[in-house]
Amino acid sequence: MFNNKLFSMNYRRGNTLCVLQLWGSACFQHIESYQRRSLAPVHYAPRSPDVSRADDQYLSKEKSMGIMSKLGQQWRKPTGSLGRLLLSAMNINHSKLTDWALSHISIGRHDTILDVGCGGGATVQKLARIASEGKVCGIDLSEESVKVSNRRNKQLIKTDRVEIRHGTVSSLPFSDAMFDLVTAVNTHNYWPNLVADMREVLRVLKPGGKLMIVGGGYKGGKNANRNEKFAKLVNIPLHSVNELSKLFSMAGYADVQIFEEHDRGWICGTGTKPL
């Protein structure tokens, strides 16, 4: 059931990402209820009031499914004004999650770092502050994300401390053994082939370099039921602690570690490229 009070509270506070999740979940429940009732349009002439209601319900279902399809596309590849709104929300809502994840790894001042799915560029900016004499690259499939990240990191780009590129994790436009660290914050669920793409990341890591995958929701964590419904809604997988650990191993990483913040529903996995 849609929680109007929670929706209004988050809207007033500017929690855009939460607002969209609530809206998306409501649409999902709406679609699911009609699927259970197996409603379908029936056309008679003349139409009775009951048939009219069935048609209206079917159209409402179709409209909700269309909305969710568009929302899923935006989450995967932000575009236009809605995409910019999502990117702004992600920068805000992913900040504490990113800080928590970064507390589990060591970053050197001279490190070269790649952020895969850099979105609005906030994580790139954080990493550049830590690797204060190194270089941070960001890559994103969305051209809108590249534009927003470039704007956010304009000064760092001028001094050649940051570089943002358009591209895909499946074919990274970087040389072998280039990075000390590769990060992915709430993006790995959208990768086309997770194991193959993790192997592509392995290629660009230096021996001893790390991949850090961060998720704001996972199977078995807090709000798992809500998160799994939302994942189904936008057609992405969610992984458990054991599943994520296995993916790292399958992709060829050593020293795999999985960290949980169960009360917040956060997960962070790290793996090292063998020497």
Image (cartoon, rainbow, N blue to C red):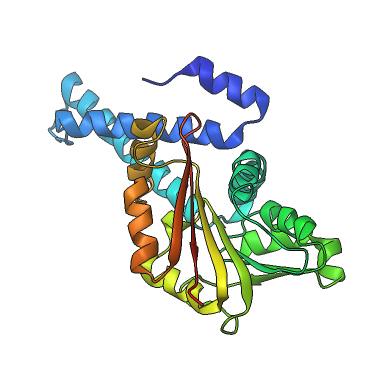
Say above or below: 9 vs 182.
Answer: above
Residue 26 appears left or right of 270: left
The quadrant the N terminus occupies is top left
Q: Position of residue 47 (x, y in %)?
A: 17, 27
Residue at image location 54% in from the left, 31% down from the top: 19
Q: Is residue 141 visible?
A: no
Question: Which residue occupies the foreground of this view, 166 or 185?
Answer: 185
Tag count: 0
Q: Specify the farthest residue to the top.
A: 5
Say which quarter of the image contains residue 44: top left
Q: Specify the farthest residue to the bottom.
A: 175
Q: Position of residue 141 (x, y in %)?
A: 54, 66
Residue 125 appears left or right of 179: right
Residue at image location 65% in from the left, 44% down from the top: 99
Say above or below: 96 vs 270.
Answer: above
Residue at image location 51% in from the left, 77% down from the top: 275
Question: Which residue occupies the foreground of this view, 153 or 208?
Answer: 208
Q: Is residue 49 visible?
A: yes
Question: Which residue occupies the foreground of this view, 214 or 81?
Answer: 214
Residue at image location 63% in from the left, 50% down from the top: 102
Q: Position of residue 264 (x, y in %)?
A: 51, 32
Q: Position of residue 27 (x, y in %)?
A: 37, 33
Say above or below: 15 vs 216.
Answer: above
Say above or below: 243 vs 96.
Answer: below
Question: Which residue occupies the foreground of this view, 26 or 129?
Answer: 129
Residue 154 appears left or right of 56: right
Say which quarter of the image contains residue 223: top left
